[in-house]
Amino acid sequence: MRAHHLDIFGAFHPGPGDDAPAGTETLVLLGPREPGFWAHVTAEPEFTDRKPDPMDRWSRRVIGRLACDLGVKARFPFGGPPFAPFIRWATRTGRAWTSPVSILVHDVAGLMVSYRGALALKERIALPEPPAAPPCETCHKPCLTACPVSALTPQGYDTIVCHAYLDTVPGEACLSAGCAVRRACPLSQSYGRQPAQSAFHMRSFHP
């Protein structure tokens, strides 16, 4: 996985209500390993062939090949409907939580967390203990005041307000460097994600 700049972002033993593939004993979630993911992935064929959805196509190829090599099943957070319940799976790992601004926060990636895929193993493997508490419990929570238009709050994500702001001149900062709220998170700042990667995702969200 490290050759592809992927890392394990958490794992858990699914139960009957987790909607994991049949026979799954351990579900492993994969995300970008930083620093270096963006430089690696943008040099891959999917980012040079001028076809749409390069990140998703890269994820499907690379993680799909990993699954085949291991003799397991792969699942992805795209390609639906129906969509695999990645947000629920993320919280089940004990390494991701609902943040003070309602989106997921990860123990390493902070508010920059993203999942590229999951591997469904038939073996029940021993897992390390997750963190005892969310990182937000000891944080001064700059995320709560970072959005200029209060689109992200404890009550949820107002995407209409967000899109409207991104159409303004001040909103260009979020488009070019990434969401101000995500950037405000101390864990996000230590994660090492490049602004160009955030800009890519912002342009996908707000063409």
Image (cartoon, rainbow, N blue to C red):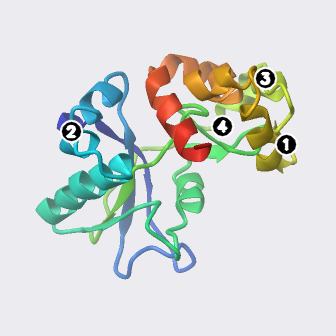
> Which badge, 2 or 3, comes first in the chain's sequence?
2
Residue type at mark 2 is Glu
Residue 22 sits above or below residue 90 on the image = below
From the image, tell me which residue sits under label 4.
133
Residue type at mark 4 is Ala
Q: Residues within 10 Å of mark 3 (few under 14, many from 20)?
A: some
Name the image quarter holding the N terminus: top left
Mark 1 vs 3: CB contact within 8 A:
no
Measured Cα–Cα span from mark 4 to mark 1: 19 Å
User: In the rendered view, does 19 fall on the left or right side of 22?
Assistant: right
Residue 94 sits above or below residue 171 on the image = below
Q: Which mark is residue 146?
A: 3
Q: How many marks?
A: 4
Measured Cα–Cα span from mark 2 to mark 4: 37 Å
| Helix, strand or loop at mark 2 | loop
**Which of labels 3 and 4 is toward the front?**
3
Measured Cα–Cα span from mark 2 to mark 1: 38 Å
From the image, tell me which residue sits under label 2.
44
**Which of labels 4 and 1 is toward the front?**
1
Measured Cα–Cα span from mark 2 to mark 3: 34 Å
From the image, tell me which residue sits under label 1.
154
Residue 40 sits above or below residue 24 on the image = above
Which residue sits at x=57%, y=23%? 176
User: In the rendered view, does 140 fall on the left or right side of 134?
Assistant: right
Q: Position of residue 173 (x, y in %)?
A: 66, 20
Measured Cα–Cα span from mark 3 to mark 4: 23 Å
> Which badge, 4 or 1, comes first in the chain's sequence?
4
| Helix, strand or loop at mark 4 | loop
Residue type at mark 3 is Ala
| Helix, strand or loop at mark 3 | loop
